[in-house]
Each structure stands twice: as structure tokens, then as C-alpha cells.
Image: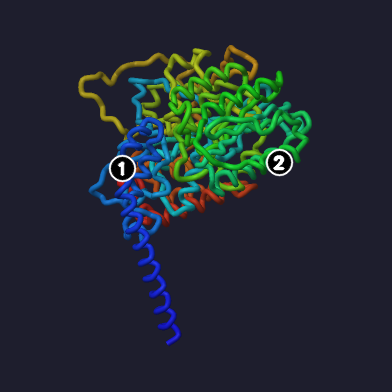
Amino acid sequence: MKTLFSISLISTALLLSGCAQEKDLETSKESSNDKQETVIVDQKQRADNNNQQIMVENITVQPTRQKLITTQISYAPLSVNKYRAGGQDVQMPPAHFINEANNNEKYSHQESNGTILVNEQPVSTFSIDVDTAAYANVRRLLNQGKLPQHDVVRVEELVNYFSYDYPTPTKQPFSVYSEIGPSPYNADKYLLHLGIKGKAVPKTGRPAANLVFLVDVSGSMNNANKIGLLKNALKMLTNQLNQDDSVAIVVYAGAAGVVLKPTKGDNKPAIIDALCKLSVGGSTNGGAGIEAAYRLAQQSFIKGGINRIMLATDGDFNVGTINNQALKNLIENKRKSGIDLSILGFGVGNYNDELMQQLAQTGNGNAYYIDNLHEARKVLVEELSSTLFTIAKDVKIQVEFNPNIVSEYRLIGYETRALKREDFNNDKVDAGDIGAGHTVTAIYEISLTNGKNKANDTLRYQTQNTTHKTTAKNQNEFAFLRLRYKTPTEKSSRLIEVPLLKSDIIESIATTSNSYKFSAAVAGFAQLLRGGENLSTMNKKDVIDLAQQGRGEDLHGYRGEFINMVKLAQALSPQLSIDNGANNAVGHK
């Protein structure tokens, strides 16, 4: 009886609540109908600079009872193939990816690299990338119970989230490592694993830092996982500074302003007090904030030191300079002054990943996504030297494959970092930088000329007996690796050349290094999340097994966390754990 009485009370309460909501809605509807014509006229007048707000008003003019009783997750009808985002019609992602709190997030679309014939294009050129924002963002989405859209995932950023056991540099700013072994992705293929490790610098050896915290305090940041997390993250960074360092704080919303003039790094109470007093409200004039931050950084410029702006934002710029190209041009002009720009991304729902990546690349900085305090500690405490201190800039990689030994290759990831062949020798072409202690990894999947599993068929009208120039000296080389880099103070690049030998090929994945196994597992997982169209022999269970084999020393538990992430993704998409991941994941496009 008690149970039935309780259920009755709950049902009555829900009914009364629903009636009250319905009554409120009717009242709202009557007043809305009277004003709707005025609203529409007003909306047209503001369309050029306020599309997003207009869209919200249109949606909320006539709410329905069904809207009130639906869960937060919204599953779109399969017949609908477009939706509104940022005021424009865009292609509808799969129904199980749509979430009302997330459908305004912006990501750049990039097609995955294809398989290239060595006879047609023997040289591959790209810039290094040490950003890690995509990994933290993927983790955030999985922890929310959602599989990420393909464009959220940048393979190289997942791989480079982890440090690898590469040789310690001696004479040069970084060491170069290579390893080739069987591919776990496809039968009768190999992975060429390339690794770079920057020279580590102890905390006491770090140059003095001139930092400007550029903080977004617009209304879109009014959330605990935005402004609240941002404050705590910058407090962590502040606690790592000393008397030789300088910190200033610029905020921007509708306009930009200085809340803390350049202050010695050991005056932590003043810096933390300024952070604690930050409050949010208003629109977002990112362009004005960036200009103000560069002016302040220039005033406190430290010759031979670290001069960097740390932009903390969700990227939802909506007033002032909001054109992406205009913002990039602004930063490109400012970076010539020797002041770098790095990004700390925060929040969900309106996170502009596309813009954050472009600004960090243009500003000679890195892009990070801070989804929790543990990530803030990793970026701003454990890896502070590599986050702030650049030891080599404009680092480019070029690989020439020997067509007598290699028939095809595919660069896994780095789609946004592709360079033209001639860009390699052009020192005016910008490329990625390496921080102190950073490791960078790149992976190619290759097919040998005597292999049976090839992506491209033999051409009917082309001779297959073409001979290529080799000598006794290079006939054992399956590829030739070239790297270019500049020291932080140089304008001309330096060249490193390393021959890659066929005799170094490892025939069993069991005898490859932990770095090889674990990076291959991470890259495989990333490819599965992007659709897995280039994988035929790997699914999520295989990823877990390979990652466990290559886990090695895991001081901070990051590798263990990755394995748990794969298990979570496996639970969210059980069909991928039963059948081959490559065949099923394509349906997620």
C-alpha cells in the first residue's frame, strides 16, 4: 500500500507540474504571437552579426509540451539530412551523434590521406604537429557517452598525446628514430614508425617567461567547465612561475581590457587574486582581445626569453573581427614580433575547434583542450617546459621512397599539416615547432613491391619493367628521410638526412618496441573512430590487446586511461567489437 500511495503521489505531482507548464506555455504562446511579427523584423536587422541568437529566438517562440518531456539527447529523424548550425544549413551527422548541447561545435572537415603509388609520387612532405587538443576532446565525448564525429578525430594528435622512449638528443636539439615492422591494420603490409625527441630542459634551466593570459569572459563562458575550470588551470600555471617571469592578464567580451598589468611571477597572491575576480557576461570580441594582448606582451618583451600569449577560450567569437581568415592574418602579422600564441580550449556546446587549430598554427603555438583538472595539470605543470619553451621551429619532414622496394605508402594523419614538395626547402614556409622534451611520432603504412596486398591495381598500358637509379651504396635503402628545422633565433634552416634500410625491417610485431606497439594501437583506434576504411585486420579488441602489449612504463597512468577509453568506445558501439571494425565503422560517416 505504501508503495502504491507513493507512486500515486509522484504521478499526481508530475501531472500538476505538467499542467502548470502547459498553462505557462499557453500564456507564453499568446504573448509570443502578438510579438512574433516584430521579432522577425528585428531578427532580419540583426542577421549579419547575430545569426546564432536569432536561431535560438525562432526555436523558442513556440515551445511544445513534447519538448519539455524529452531527454537531453535528441535523436534526429533519419529522413532529415540537414540542420542549422551557426546560421547555415550543414549536412546532418548520424542520428546517434546529435546532442542539443553540442550541435554548435565547429570542426574542420579533412579527408583521410589515401594510398599513393611510389612510381607516381615518391616524395611525401609534411610539417610536424605536437597539438593534443583532439585527444582530450575525444576523451570528453566518450565520457559523456557519445562517439565522436569523424572530424573531431585527428590521428596525429591522439598519437602525440603520449611520450615515447626515443633516444636522448646529444648534439642536435632533437634525436631522430625509425622502426619498421608488420602492420596490424592490413595483411602483408608494414608500418614505418618515425620518432623525434626534443632535448629536455630542467625547470631551473627554463628561460624567463613573459606571459599574457588572454581570457575570454564573454557570456558563453558562464559555466563551471569553462570559466571555473579556466581559473583553476591558470592558477596551476601561476604556481610554477618564479621571480624572473612576468604575467599580465587581458580579458575580452564585448570589448577588451587589462585586469593585471605585468607582474612578477613570484607575486602569486596578486596574480591569483586577479584570476579569482574574473566574471563573465556580454558578447565575444576575440579580435580586440588578441590585439590588446600582443600590445601588452610587446611592452614586457624579454629578449632571449619566452614571450607567449595563452589564449583561454571556447572560441565562440561573435562580434568585432569574426572572420577566420582576418583573425589569422592579424596573428600572422603579430608573430613576426617574436611573440607566440598558444590556445587553451574549454567547454562544450559551442566549442570552435576549427578556429582554435587555425589560430594556434598561425601563431607558432600549440592547441590544447582542457576537459578537466588532470589535463590542466598535465599541460601546465608536468609538461610546462615543452608547453612554453620552443627549442626548434619550422620543423619539416620529407620521406622519399625507393620504387624498387616500396610500391605504395599512406601517411596516417597529418592531413592539416601537408606541405608541397618545394615547401621543404623554402624557409619562408611556416611549419610546426618542438618544445623542450616533446616527442613527435609519424607513421606510414607501406606495401613492398613483392607484396600481394596492394590498394592500387597494375596499370594496363604502362610498362612494369621501368628501372630506377640505384647504386651499390643505396640499393638496400627502402626510403630516405630528410628533416629541416631552425633554432629559435635562426632564419635559415638546418638539414638532417637519414637513410632507412631494408635490412632493418622487423618481421614479427612481437619483437617491435613498446613505442611501436602502443603508437600503432593509438593510431588504429583513431582510424576506427574516423570510419576505419583503411583497416581490414583490426577492431577495438585488437587495439586493446596491442596497447596492453606496448603499455610499458606508465608513470602517470595515461596509457592505462587510453585502454579504458577504447573499452568505453567498444561498449558504446558493440558491433565494432564483434565484427571487423573497418567494415562496420564506415556506417558512422
Q: Report the disc number at residue 504.
A: none
Label 2 neighbour load within 10 Å: few <14, some 14-19, many 20+ = some
Gap in Å between the C-alphas at discs 2 and 1? 43 Å
Q: Amino acid at mark 2?
A: Ile
Q: Position of residue 455 (x, y in %)?
A: 31, 33
Q: Nearer the viewer, residue 563 or 146?
A: 146
Q: Which residue is mark 1?
A: 83
Residue at the image position 39 percent from the left and 75 percent from the top? 12
Q: Is residue 528 visible?
A: no
CB atoms of marks 2 and 1 within 8 Å: no
Provide the secondary structure element on which disc 1 rests.
Answer: strand
Q: Position of residue 274 (x, y in %)?
A: 69, 39
Residue at the image position 51 percent from the left and 24 percent from the top? 362
Q: Amino acid at mark 1?
A: Tyr
Q: Report the disc number at residue 272.
A: 2
Q: Eyeballing the image, is 339 above or below 375?
A: above
